[in-house]
Image (cartoon, rainbow, N blue to C red):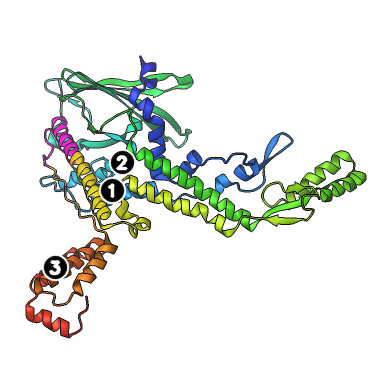
Amino acid sequence: MSNIISTRVHRILAARREQIARNIAAWRGGQPYIDLRLWRAPNESELSWAGTRSEGGKQVFVSVGRKQRAAMINDAGRVVSKITQYLFKTHADRTGIDDAWGKDVTGRGQSVGSFWVDVSELLTAGQWVWLQVDRLGQIKDPITGEMRQRTLLEKQRDSDQVRWTAWPSLSVPDWSFDSAGRLQWVITEGEQYVNDDPKVEAETYKLRTLWERTAGGYRVTQYRSGKDGESVQIGDTVAVIGDGLPFVLVGQPDEAPWWFDDVESIQAQLLNLDSLHFENLVRTVFPQLVIPTGMLDSLQSKLIERVGASNGEKIVELVKEIVRGLDAPIVESAEEAGVTRFIMPAASDQKTIPDELQRKRALLFDMVGLSLFNKETRQIQTAESKQFDQLDTESTLKHRAIIMQAAEERLVEITLKVDPTFAKYTPVWPTSFDVVDVESDSAAIAMIGNLPDITLSMRKIVLLAALRIISERGGYDQDLIEQARSEIKDITEEQSVEADVGGLDF
């Protein structure tokens, strides 16, 4: 049985695992994503790609290749951070939450707000997330001899704090629901790093945990990876009093593509286009050399006469490496040109890839309904399309907030069953999101403010709209913003006229 537990994978995850791994890598960016998604160009030499060449049947390092020179502009990560930025701009109301527990919900010092930020980002890139409630095991009652939960004093003594854990979709390889939609069992997977003893070499191994629903709650069995792919059960099966498995599924596991797949595919194209564009610039700095064939023939003949045939050919190859620029030079006959020269693309041709990069980046943000965040396309959008994009963005954020609130409500319910002394609270997430297009809104406010014969009410509206933009930009004390809002509402007609005389210009 243990071998099955250590290897089994749900059909949905098996179909989605490779793409989800790419999505998460794209979100996090850096060299791991470059190594994963940078493509070698057709007929690209090993020297250009990896910076190596073959000598004596071995690849010898010569210089840093294109694969190591590539850099990533992480637009996929920007999409994730923008959703997070707007979703958590206004904090959820958690009236009644235990303040001390709310500052450390994971047992590793992570606050409840930070925990849900991680959940949202994992959901964006990973399609679904598993949330788990856990605490220390039961203790044996010294009087009755039966297993029971700890008292408040025993909890404080043993640091028995209920903990929340977010499992990415890739970290839960298999699960099963019954016909009533109840979770029957779930398998979680992680790595265990053991370095407790400084006199013993540290060890890393895979750890899978089987959580099974029982009549009285659930039981937990752990399996540790061993040698030759074998897995070994560690520890005893633990019986826990509760009501079903302490897991909440956020999102919907599905074999169908996820919208972030398209973001990742465009991100990969951007990475490769940018890398190739940089190489073109390098080739412009080191233009392609063209050598008449007669010149090399004459050089080779003289070298063979002096050092012998085999050595002469080797020296000719070394000469080619020195004069080649980036790749081997083009060698042509005297009838074709007969003149040693450099060739390179025109400046207008070099502009083709940057134009395509700009177009691809615009497509990437359009695909996720975040066109308002894309400065490159904002100038050419019509008023109707801007309004549509804003509504699309706010709808996306509202849908995410509703999902997150429902998940937190369910998590609180499970937590109360696992720990009846838990301080119950009802989370209320914001469902209205003010997505501001600062540039176009500022222009509209300036135009309205400069209208002739503007009324006092309209003047107040203009000032409040300007304050909204200032507040959106951030960096200002909220009390100061509220004070300004109050002062604007209290402006009188006389003060407004005096401001005009004083040279107040909208």
Residue at horizontal 61 percent and vertical 48 percent from the top: 64
Which numbered tag is attached to residue 83?
A: 1
At label 3, counting other C-alpha atoms closer than 10 Å, the crowd grade (few under 14, some 14-19, many 20 or more) is some
Magenta stretch encompasses residue 408: yes
Task: Place residue 24 in its image quadrant.
Answer: top left
- Looking at the picture, which amino acid does disc 1 mark? Ile
Lateral position of residue 66 relative to residue 208, left or right: right
- Looking at the picture, which amino acid does disc 3 mark? Ile
Whether residue 480 can be seen here: yes
Q: Quadrant of the N terminus?
A: top left
Lateral position of residue 25 relative to residue 246, left or right: right
Sequence-wise, which precedes: disc 2 or disc 3? 2
By secondary structure, the bulk of the magenta-drawn segment is best described as helix
For residue 398, above or below residue 421:
below
Q: Residue furthest right?
A: 305
Q: Which residue is mark 3?
A: 461
The image shows residue 114 at horizontal and vertical percentages of 26, 47
Q: Residue furthest front?
A: 335
For residue 460, above or below residue 173:
below
Which numbered tag is attached to residue 124?
A: 2
Which numbered tag is attached to residue 249?
A: none
Lateral position of residue 499 relative to residue 346, left or right: left
For residue 464, above or below residue 491:
above
Real-space Cα separation, disc 3 to disc 1, in angstroms: 29 Å
Sequence-wise, which precedes: disc 2 or disc 1? 1
Q: What span is colored magenta in the figure? A: 405-426
Real-space Cα separation, disc 2 to disc 3, in angstroms: 37 Å
The image shows residue 281 at horizontal and vertical percentages of 58, 55
Foreground residue, 213 or 422?
213
Task: Place residue 428 in its image quadrant.
Answer: top left
At label 1, counting other C-alpha atoms closer than 10 Å, the crowd grade (few under 14, some 14-19, many 20 or more) is some
